[in-house]
Amino acid sequence: MLFFDLDGTLLDSNGIWLEIDIEFLGRHGIAPVPEDYTDYVAHHGAEESAAYTRRRFGLTEREGEILQAWQDMAQEAYASRLPLKPGAGEFLARCRRAGYPMALLTSCMPQLCRAALAHHQLEGVFTQVVTAQELGLEKRDPEFYRRAAALCHGNLEESILFEDAPNYCAAARRAGLAVAGVADPLFEPRREELQASCTYWVDSFLALPPELERRLFPGK
């Protein structure tokens, strides 16, 4: 089975979250956005990120209000503007033709995830969409991947996860998954760390590394 992250892996969306952080924190007189804050929210689900934001900056809004503000700012982008990574759509179609069951494992807000899938006409591609919010586990927790695989009836030892975030790649490896790390500008400063935690390295879906190509499409 093939598992895919959404933000920064299939969808070229990590940049929009920095824009949202700048706008949201700017409303509270916080600028520039602290680098360690960006790193934290990039590696945690929406609910935990909202709780952290409230604690970190002493905000009066409740976590639900923070989540709603983020969703309102992101909705239009996910529903109409954010593109897929180069070659991602074609790669998914190729995997589907090869008969692979595929599932989406994401910390994206469920509403935004559904909006992006609808925009790119990908609703029927995945047998299951598992979100951190709905599962109640963070993607940095290896148990997330064990539970997700059970829900999707996938064998961890025979599956591959495509993911761009270093902490999530490391957690998936600890859970027993093979991991294909996907390059994204947000994590470029941590490229060596990410590559060290991955089974395969994907600079672009336009050209897979030969060892991954052979595993996925033997005899082609």
Image (cartoon, grey):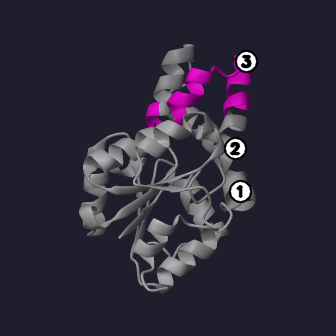
User: Vertically, is 126 above or below 177?
Assistant: below
Q: Is residue 46 visible?
A: no
Which comes before the other along the chain, label 2 or label 1?
2
Q: How far apart are marks 3 and 2 (CA)?
A: 17 Å
Amino acid at the residue labelled 1: Leu
**Front residue of 128 and 97:** 97
Q: Which amino acid does label 2 sit on?
A: Ile
Kindly indicate whether the residue at mark 1 contacts the one at mark 2 (C-beta within 8 angstroms): yes
Numbered disc 2: secondary structure: helix
- Residue at image x 72%, y 53%? 76
Name the kind of residue labelled 3 in the image: Ala
Q: Is 160 rendered above or below residue 199?
A: below
Residue topped by disc 1: 82
Q: Residue at x 69, y 43 (%)?
A: 15
Image coordinates for residue 187, horizontal then vertical, percent: 58, 39
Badge number at residue 96? none
Q: Position of residue 61 (x, y in %)?
A: 56, 24
